[in-house]
Image: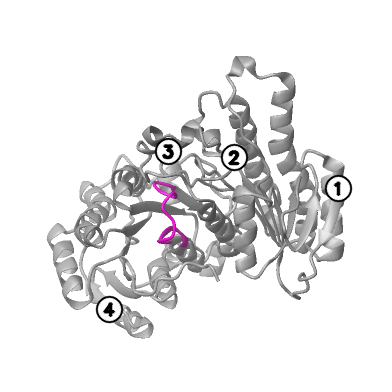
Amino acid sequence: MQMTRSSSSTITNAPIGIVTGAASGIGAAIAAELKNRGWLVAGFDLKPAGSDCDVIVDMSDTRAVAEGVDQIRRSLGDIDAAISAAGFYEMIPAAQITQSQWNRMLNVHLGGAFNLAQAVIPHMVEMKSGSFVGITSELAIGGGSEDSHYAAAKGAIIGLIRSLAAEVASSGVRVNGVAPGPTDTPLLTPDSPWRAPDYLATLPSRRLAKPEEIAYVVAYLIEEGTFTTGEIISPNSGAVI
Amino acid sequence: MSIPTYEGKVVLVTGAAQGMGKVIAETFAARGATVIVNDRSDDPRLHELAKAIGGHVAVADVSKHDEVQTLFDQVQKDVGLVDVLIPNHAYMSMAPFVGYDHEDWWKVVNTNLSGTFWLIQSALAGMRARGAGRIVIITSGWGVIGWPEATAYSASKAGLISLVKTLGRELAPEKIIVNGIAPGVIDTPQLQVDADAAGVSLAEVHALYAKGIPFGRIGKPEEIARTAAMLADFRMQSLVGQIVQVNGAEIRGRV
């Protein structure tokens, strides 16, 4: 775990958010949207995210995540929102998924979300305010061929979110999820079947989701959806309705 | 700022004389929209609201197909084509299923479900002419999980959920995006009706309902209005055919 604070991170009274996977794709779009809305953002990623305070960390490393959160609290202040967006994607037929591939998938997605939640939510409960958003996937709801380990990890995040929401609701802390459909990020390789014109033509929206759209939904959940908790919102171009 | 704004957009909100509809109208107006407020009778509160938000009044009983058509003709003449439609009106009556009055069944279904169907049918021509539109249907948590003695209401609201899904699929290719909201218990004048029916004070009803909600309080109309404003965001096209449940973690069911 390694932390870099940018010199511009001196705004006072700005709300403070942690975004994991902030260096690219959906995480980067969420970090940018929060910046637009006046937040101070700490980006947790394997590589620098260019946030107000970058933390280089592997989200599957429980201790390193906890240390990163502690350092952000010391250097920026109490955490108002935490968004778990770190992840990766690979398609493998179920019979061929190795134990290490299975474990890595669960450790990064489910473990990463849990590690972040466990590090930030107790403080939110103490403050009696705060918002946690986990990025899950439309595949967790609808499933997909060759997606069993990814869908299992993302599906478990939904159970985590709903249970956490019930557990901390009385403290005024909200926990929600966003389940994007195929989104135009580097996670989808140029030859990904999700980019194939034949597939896109089957989507009611006729196109991939854009990372900014996911970020708008996250921003709603954090700032505007103040009675919305335990909910999963799925911007998925109509792939799963 | 990145909160969705509605400058230059025409928004029609039904059931706007009070409760959630009123606050939805105020929210869209505050974000720049020209808002048309509808209710079934020429209620002075509707005129006060329109005056306060610089909007327009359009009275119609939306359960009647011809009145809906007349409403849209009038709106187009006076204001223009509707960009955003928020069917929010509702009629509710509760009674045990076996003795449930048939006339009341049809009144609930015709108002809540058919009324919304007519509204969307009439709104489509304008949205197609503009090449885009947003529809946010206010359904109910009871449409998701059902509720004893609310047969007609729950069925009508479940029908609306299906309308969201079907029209989400059917209209998205034309950039007309349909989504819904399933509110839980929200602080509206309905709670006074509930209090009167139970013979208790409004404060007691608030406390009783709050006890059943993990979040520890009932919702505010503003919280539904802000959700509607998110769902009507013209920058978004991939969020479609979905029901957003706004209920303080009260309802644990599948949409």
User: Could you tell me which chain the residue with mark 4 belongs to?
Assistant: B
- Callout 1–callout 3 Cβ contact below 8 Å: no
Q: Residues within 10 Å of mark 3 (few under 14, many from 20)?
A: many
Q: Position of residue A177 (x, y in %)?
A: 59, 47
The segment highlighted magenta reads: B230-242
Q: Position of residue A151 (x, y in %)?
A: 58, 31
CA distance separating discs 3 and 2: 18 Å
Q: Are marks 1 and 4 on the same chain?
A: no
- Was residue B18 drawn as part of the magenta stretch in this picture? no
The residue tagged 2 is A187
Q: Which residue ends up furthest to the front in the rendered image?
A: A190
Judged left or right of residue A93, residue B34 is left
Q: Position of residue B251 (x, y in %)?
A: 53, 47
The residue tagged 4 is B56
User: Could you tell me which chain the residue with mark 1 belongs to?
Assistant: A
- Was residue B239 drawn as part of the magenta stretch in this picture? yes
